[in-house]
Amino acid sequence: MIGSLYAGISGLKVNTKAMSVIGDNIANVNTTGFKTSKVSFANIFSASLGSTENQIGRGVTLAGVNPVWDSGSLENTTSVTDLAVNGKGLFIVNNDDGSQLYTRAGKFDFDKDGNLTTQDGLTVQGYAIDANGDFAPELSDIALPSANSIPLATDEFLMGINLDSTAEVGDEYTNSLTVYDSLGNAIPLTLTFKNTATGKWTATPSIPASAGSVTSAAIQVTFDGNGNLTAPATDSVIQLTLTNGATSTQDITWDLYENGSTNGSLTGYSGASAASSQTQDGYASGSLQGVSVDEDGVFTGLYSNGTMTPFAQIALADFASYSGLAKMGSNLYSTSVNSGQATIGMPGSGSLGSVSPSSLEMSNVDLSDEFVQMITTQRAFQANSKVITTSDEILAELINIKR
């Protein structure tokens, strides 16, 4: 009977621990990225009474507490830096001692120094992207780019213009567009078209005297009998001499041809001379207005001048055994012998999942399952306590035999 007492005590102990795990799961039902844990039991080795048919167990022990790594539901948020992993992988953050930790809780934000951090101030890791769009080979902190974007001088422009084939000699038509110098100054560039003969025009470029002057000659424009451009035979270059502190000379190509044929932007059909469209590739400097994140985890700076500059891509880590990761608290994990080393890569590469911006992964705790587990654990505890009280009563009767 002493053996049954100890068997009952082992049952009380493991079910107490099981209730602690259930309580922890329920307490974290609203914890971002939390993974529920399941308790597994194992019987204690049996005492043999001469044959395997007569083995008697010694009770139960706690075999392990294993996290369930099923993905939780995604909750939409209003912050673009709230991120969730859709699939396998964990975010990588730098610990205060320089070591790496891992998390599924993507509640991130930029701190006062411009670094993307967790709520505990740990910096999120990724790959920096330079001005040419090339990725850095090593992990680094994800940090906001410069508050101002570099201006881009206009190198090329295109005008969709029809010049009236019925215009009289001497008739003029003017059209202007804004171009930019190397400092980002806006310069109005005007083209004055003058009809010199049937199907022939001159295009004279000009800029305000306060900005400088045009040093290239007027451009001779000729159309064939179908109104198609035949001269100039190639794209024309307009050369500016600037006096406002920018690069002293600036060449701007007037885009008229593609693969040796007219691109149709300049025509000589019957109808009023008019411009239908115009584009140019320069822009002024701009201030950082916000940040966007896509499913590949690429962070892009949004500037007031309309430019969008990618500056970083978040990294993810994969493991041979997620159950082997060591819990560090605050939704953080570290590697262990059982988890294996981290395999680090970009979202969507290999077995890694994608990133869902403006989303957070919710806890995967199933309350209905936890309540059922709570009931069965409570009943198991009660049953084991009955084993103890019943064994005690039998022992009492045994002692009373001598009376």
Image: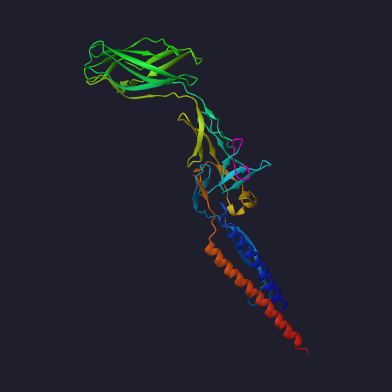
Magenta span contains residue 67: no
The quadrant the C terminus occupies is: bottom right
Quarter assignment of residue 260: top left
Residue 162 in picture, x, y percent from top left: 27, 21
- The answer to whether residue 82 is seen in the rendering is yes
Residue that protrudes farthest toward the right in the picture: 403
Residue that protrudes farthest toward the bottom in the picture: 403
Residue 51 in picture, x, y percent from top left: 66, 76
Number of marks drawn: 0
Q: Is residue 62 above or below residue 234?
A: below
Q: Main SS type for the magenta part?
A: loop
* Residue in the image at 50% along x and 20% along y: 183
Q: Give the side of residue 279 with respect to residue 361, left or right.
A: left
Q: Give the side of residue 320 with respect to residue 251, left or right.
A: right
* Residue in the image at 49% along x and 38% along y: 292
- The magenta-colored residue range is 112-122
- The answer to whether residue 49 is seen in the rendering is no
Magenta span contains residue 119: yes
Image color mode: rainbow
Q: Give the side of residue 320 with respect to residue 186, left or right.
A: right
Depth order, front residue of 107/352: 107
Depth order, front residue of 8/27: 27
* Residue in the image at 57% along x and 41% along y: 109
Residue 235 in picture, x, y percent from top left: 35, 17
Residue 123 in picture, x, y percent from top left: 61, 40
The quadrant the N terminus occupies is: bottom right
